[in-house]
Amino acid sequence: MSLITITGLTIAYGFRDSRLIAVNSVDLEIGEKEFLAVVGESGCGKSTLALSMIGLLPKSVATIVAGQIVYKGTDLVKLDNNELRRYRGTEIAMIFQEPLTSLNPVYRVGDQMAEAIAIREARTGGDEALAGSSSVMQEVHRSDEVRVSRVPRPKKRVSSELKKEAVDALKLVRIPDPEQVLERYPFELSGGMRQRVMIAMALSQRPKLLVADEPTTALDVTTQAQVLKLMKELMSEVNTSILLITHDLAVASQVADRVVVMYAAEVVEDADVFALFSEPLHPYTKGLLSCIPTGSKDDTKLLPIPGSVPDLVNPPVGCRYASRCPYVMDVCRTREPQLVEVKPKHKVACYLYGK
Amino acid sequence: MDIGRYIARRLLLAIFVLLGVLVVTFILSHSYGDPIYAWLGKNAALHPNLVKLYEDKYHLNDPVYIQFYYYIVGLAQGNLGVSPSRGFEPVSQVIEQTLPFTLQIAFFAIVMTLVMGIALGIAASFYYKRPVDYGVRAFYLAGYASPSFFVALILLIVLVYYLHLLPSGEAVGVGIFPPHVITGIPMLDALIQGDWTYLGSALQHIILPSLALALTTFGVVTRILRSSVLDVMQSNYIRTARAKGVNERTVFLRHGLRNAMIPVITVSSLIVTFILTGTVFVEYIFAYPGMGQYVVQALLGQDFPGILACTLIYALLIVLTNLAADILYVVVDPQIRLG
Amino acid sequence: MTEKTKPKNQMSLGRLAFITGDAKVRVNKEMIIGGVIVAFFVVVAIAVTIADILHITITPYNPDTPNVGPLFGPPSLAHPMGTDNLGRDQLSRILAATPNAVVIGFVVVGFSLALGLIIGSFAGFHGGFADEALMRLTDIFFAIPALVLAIAIVAALHASLLNLMIALMIVWWPAYARLSRGETLKVSHQNYIEAARTSGYGSARIIFRHVLPNIFVTLVVYATLDIGTVILTYSGLSYLGLSVPPPAPDWGYMVASFGDSLLSDPWLPLFPGLLIAISVIGFSIFGDGFRDAISGN
């Protein structure tokens, strides 16, 4: 059963005299407890797609022109910002590419996690006003003062519960010495640690879907592997689907169940991870795969794709990959191919398959 | 956690700066012709016995470094010379009478500056590139560009002479007696003792001068806050807060504003300097009996001891606010505390 | 998109472009509005000065001749800004005082810029004691309000336009020294400076050839904004009677001397005050626009 269904989603970035279609009639489906990876080059619209799912597109420049994002029967596109907010965090959570700057520099890790947990509790308790009150962030601080001055405060129980949950969340992401880390400021932690904190914070809200936008790109290679492994492991421990946005097909192959390949604002292939790697259909996917160094001696396999990504302000007629495609046909230059299921659970947008 | 060392370092620096200021005023005291002028003013010769006294006490006929030593010692004892423009009253006494009024004005001016500056800065950033934004920018540009004496004059015409809204001149209405001295700052004393008559009148009298100062200074706050709010609200941690489902008001107040206020602390020194400079004109125009009025009086009367003493006191006030800002930094920005 | 469509209103910055390599400046609205105001004051200042040297009057009336109009005459067609207590034409007097403000603004800022650049870049480049000494010295200067220190200095020197200028120069340069020190620190860790150092060039050569050209633009931008502040401070000192001795006209002093006629003849203090504000606004807007243009905003 699918958790979220995106149909015909089109997102435009409007600049004064030029409109850039960053996402062009994209169809996408994420199942429950599914680990889906969206792969594409930078600028192919995958981050825009991710942001649109929690309604965090930059309002001043980006607009959803058409399409639906149906989450549990509700079309998120139709909701206003305040209604959308109730889905953020507890239903759909998101972690970002920049772990170094994604945590607020002036608050302790513990405070920021407590805020996330308090929002979840307020929602499950049906009293969201609590999460909005500005006392929540200070709760953890206050409990510290209480310990020092030994003055009992009524709130103490609540905040120590929050703290315990925060510790649990940090333990979940394998952070050693979590009590210590709660007292730290973000700048005292390494990039890998911060990204773990971000993941812990997101998971502490128990979302149904975790959107991870290039979570490992800014990290060094060893940390990258650790974080990816962690995300894969957490999949089985918590009841969450994960949508991983990445430019790296190799990363996707390590962790994802299913891979969606995007090119120039459109989905070109959508397949099971094994099917995609053993039998890639779209010429672009094939091209991407031949760019990955395999480690074998057969170095001739490492081929860059000739040409460059088309201009999204004035996209070409027909297939957008046509100018770079080695198998290009006449029809490719006149009509745009549709994403069709050519094999069971394997969709591709290319005239080489089907009709 | 080396807050202690950080503050100790700042304190040491402040003391050093004050010593440096003393060197500057000492040099100035020797530039008026005879060093005795710096203690008694230009007409020192009229008081031969005072001349003798000061020459002996400050070793004015000895080499410069000995003079400097006694200069410091004299200042440490609170002796700032006598003020010819005030009938040869000791300068320290004049400062004691006038400084509290300047502190009052500065306090209210800073409060108004911050209130106006922060409110308009936030408004401008919220309505970025919309009429409100342009309006705020035009307003603070006009305020910043207008000399404080000009703004004071306009306020005087409009609010006092035409609209008769507020009184002008002196610190309180005629016939109202000051409260008993506790802190030395009349309005504070009145507040402590519950002397509402005095406090009410004093408030009426302080609005105009401090408003004139705030109008010329708030732009410093507005300008920097506007751009830092715009900056901060684009930052990744704001996006994280939104992604957590924090409501927009809390995102701004809790996550945005605190970070955006950090650059405002950076310019606190500039704000205080602006306001203290402005008090010179504003007190003079509104006949407010503070140190600023005394500076002008001293200047017109070639009262060098008065000018030098005021220079020192202004520097002291600025050094103290800088110290306060340094400590405030530690509270607001943990990176300074620990980094 | 940004690469393909080049903005049409680009101009190169002449000398600055030569110095910075490729400083293309997009002229923006602020630069034009501010530039017009600044140009007006500069042109008037130059014209008045030349006329003064040639002993001719180019202002509508001779600024010092009394009774060209009624005493305390309100603004009229013949006297757009009214006439003062001696029946002198106020517009002529305001125009005649323009060179004071313009000269003080440019000279004080120019001097501070030059001295600050040299001292600041030296201290920043060499570090160590020179740097520490400069920083502490500027700390001291920043602790004393410029206006108050200038008052104390002018009090020692006697009031005149030259002495006022000297006082302002003394209190003004430290800000520039500190700024150029900071900028020097920023650039001196760049590769080309390191390369020059390892090539064994002398520090004077490196400072002049490599450091100064790179920090120059930042300082010029700051200086442009700063001229307004200088004029503001100068007008304050003038208000206190520390500028040209009467009867020569000066903006700040004109506001001061007619402060009492505020109710009866408001145009007398209002117009000079307004002129101060407009000139400061002109420099501020121009400086803002200039900064935005340089930083490619």
Image (tube, coloured by chain):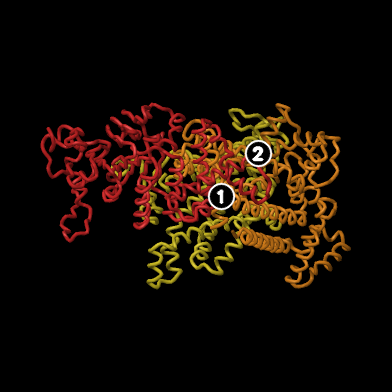
Chain colours: A red, B orange, C yellow
Q: Are marks 2 and 1 on the same chain?
A: no
Which quadrant of the figure has residue A26?
A: top left
The mark found on residue C105 in the picture is: 1
Q: Residue furthest front?
A: A237
Closest to the observer, C200 or A272: A272
Closest to the observer, C269 or C61: C269
- Tell me if residue C254 can be seen: no
Mark 2 packing: few (<14 Cα in 10 Å), some, or many (20+)? Answer: many
Location of residue B119 in the rendering, given as x and y in whole percent from the top left corner: 58, 36
Q: Residue at x 70, y 30 (%)?
A: B159
Amino acid residing under circle 1: Gly
The mark found on residue B322 in the picture is: none
Which subunit holds the residue at mark 2?
B
Quadrant of the drawing holding the N terminus of chain C: top left
Location of residue A299 in the rendering, given as x and y in whole percent from the top left corner: 17, 59
Secondary structure of the residue carrying tag 2 is helix
Location of residue A90 in the rendering, given as x and y in whole percent from the top left corner: 44, 37
Amino acid residing under circle 2: Met
Please give left or right for residue C191 compared with residue B132 in the image. Answer: left
Q: CA distance from mark 2 to mark 1?
A: 30 Å
Q: Which residue is under mark 2?
A: B112
Quadrant of the drawing holding the C terminus of chain C: top left
Location of residue C24 in the rendering, given as x and y in whole percent from the top left corner: 37, 48
Closest to the observer, C53 or A140: A140
Please give left or right for residue A49 compared with residue C51 in the image. Answer: left
Q: Nearer the viewer, mark 2 or mark 1?
A: 2
Mark 1 packing: few (<14 Cα in 10 Å), some, or many (20+)? Answer: many
